[in-house]
Amino acid sequence: MVQLNMSDDEYNRQAQIVIGGLLHRACPLTKSVLQQFDPSATRKVNASHLSSSKLKLESLEPCAEFLNIALADSESNKIYTKSTLAQRIVSALFALLPSNCSHCNEDYCVEFESKEPPILTCYKCFQESHNCETLLATYAPIVDIKLPTGLVWLCKGCTEEINITDLSDHNMVDVMLSFNPADSNRSHLNLFDENEFRSLDFAQADFSEVREKLADVTRP
C-alpha cells in the first residue's frame, strides 16, 4: 500500500465515506458484494472474501457493471472467471480509496463517476490519476496521441513495487503484451514501417554508468 500523508484514522474515515456512498447507490445484489469488502485488509484477503462460496458469480457481475467494469469483449465473450472478476472488483474499489500522487505528493480520492474523470489509469492496478497541475502539464498534451505501443502509466504504489537495479537508473517493469507473441496469426495488429518505428537496441545504447559498473564487476 502506498504511503499516505494522512493518518490511518483519517484514511479509515474517508474509506468508510467512499464505501458508504457506493452502498447508498447500489442495488441489493451489489450491496451484498460491497459489504464483504474491508478497506483495511489487503487486496489478496478481499479477493478471497469476494470469491468465496458466500458469493455467487451472479452477484459479482451486477457489482462489476455498477463499477463500470466491462464483462465481455467486443464479440460478447465473457472475459472473467469468478476468481478473476473478484480481483478486478477489488482493484476498482481500492482505486476509489485515498491514494498519494507521485507528481505532487498530495493525498487524493478519485470521485466515483466524476464529471471530470482522471486522464490516466494505472496499467497494473487500475488506480486512476490525480489531476494535479504537474501531472496534467506532463501528460495532457500526449494522452490523446495514438502511440504505436500505447501510453503506459503506473501509479505511485505500483512504481514503488518495481525493482531498481544497481546497474541502471531505469525502472525495471514487466512487459505485458495485448496479444500472444507465439500466435503466428496476428493480422489484426498494426503494421509498422521499419524506417519509422524502432525499438531500443540495448547492445548499442550508450549507458556510460552501466558500462563502468559492469567493468567493476568483471575486472579481475
Image: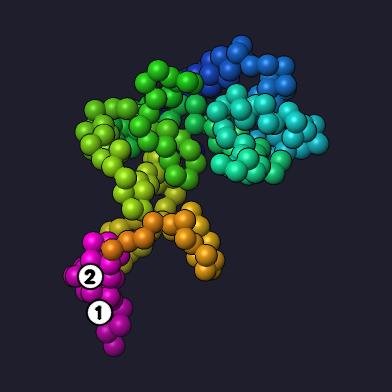
* Magenta segment boundaries in residue numbering: 194-220
Percent of width and height locating residue 117: 39, 25
Percent of width and height locating residue 213: 26, 72
Marks 2 and 1 close (CB-CB < 8 Å): no
Circle on res. 215: 1
In the rendered image, which quarter is residue 76 located in?
Answer: top right
- Disc 1 marks a residue whose amino acid type is Ala
- Disc 2 marks a residue whose amino acid type is Ala
Circle on res. 205: 2
In the image, residue 58 sits, relative to residue 15, either above or below, namely below
Callout 1: SS: helix
Q: Separation of disc 2 and disc 1 at Cα?
A: 16 Å
Callout 2: SS: loop
Packing grade of label 2 (10 A; few <14, some 14-19, many >=20) is few
Percent of width and height locating residue 202: 29, 71
Residue that protrudes farthest toward the top in the picture: 24
Residue 170 forms part of the magenta stretch: no
Left or right of 64 on screen, residue 56: right
